[in-house]
Amino acid sequence: MNKDLLYSEEEQKKIIAKMEDPSNKTGLPPASLIYALIDMVGVQTNMIQSLQESIQRLETKIQ
């Protein structure tokens, strides 16, 4: 298991279970789950940006 993950696999399963809960009549997740998902996307975005910057540095070193 990657310790860099913001949310563990168990956390993710809980989020999915809450969204699929039959008592949730609208089928929409509660606001807290939306915020958790936004946080996860933000972390992934930061990781991608860091990766892009690293690639650019490597490309300049190669040239």
Image (cartoon, rainbow, N blue to C red):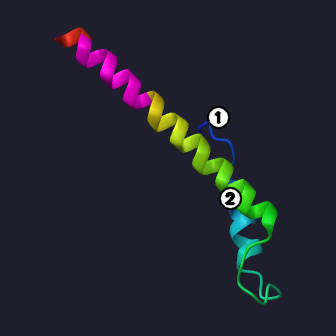
Q: Bounds of the magenta span?
A: 51-60
Residue 32, quarter of picture = bottom right
- Secondary structure state at the residue bearing disc 2: helix
Quadrant where the C terminus is found in the figure: top left
Magenta stretch holds residue 44: no
Distance between the alpha carbons at the discs numbered 1 and 2: 14 Å
**Above or below 62: residue 24:** below
Residue 59, quarter of picture = top left
Q: Residues within 10 Å of mark 2 (few under 14, many from 20)?
A: few
Q: Considering depth in this image, is 20 or 51 the residue closer to the camera? A: 51
Q: Which amino acid type is marked by label 1?
A: Lys
50 to the left or right of 61: right
Residue at the left extreme, as displayed: 63
Q: Position of residue 21 (x, y in %)?
A: 77, 81
- The residue identified by callout 2 is 12
Residue at 54% x, 43% y: name it: 44
Q: Considering depth in this image, is 17 or 31 the residue closer to the camera? A: 31
Please tell me which of labels 1 and 2 falls first in the chain: 1
Q: Position of residue 11 (x, y in %)?
A: 74, 55
Of the numbered discs in the image, which one, if any, rests on residue 3? 1
Q: Main secondary structure of the magenta part?
A: helix
Q: Position of residue 37 (x, y in %)?
A: 66, 57
Q: Residues within 10 Å of mark 1 (few under 14, many from 20)?
A: few
Q: Position of residue 62 (x, y in %)?
A: 19, 12
Magenta stretch holds residue 56: yes
**Above or below 8: residue 31:** below
Q: Which amino acid type is marked by label 2?
A: Gln
28 to the left or right of 1: right
Of the numbered discs in the image, which one, if any, rests on residue 30? none
Residue at 38% x, 22% y: name it: 54
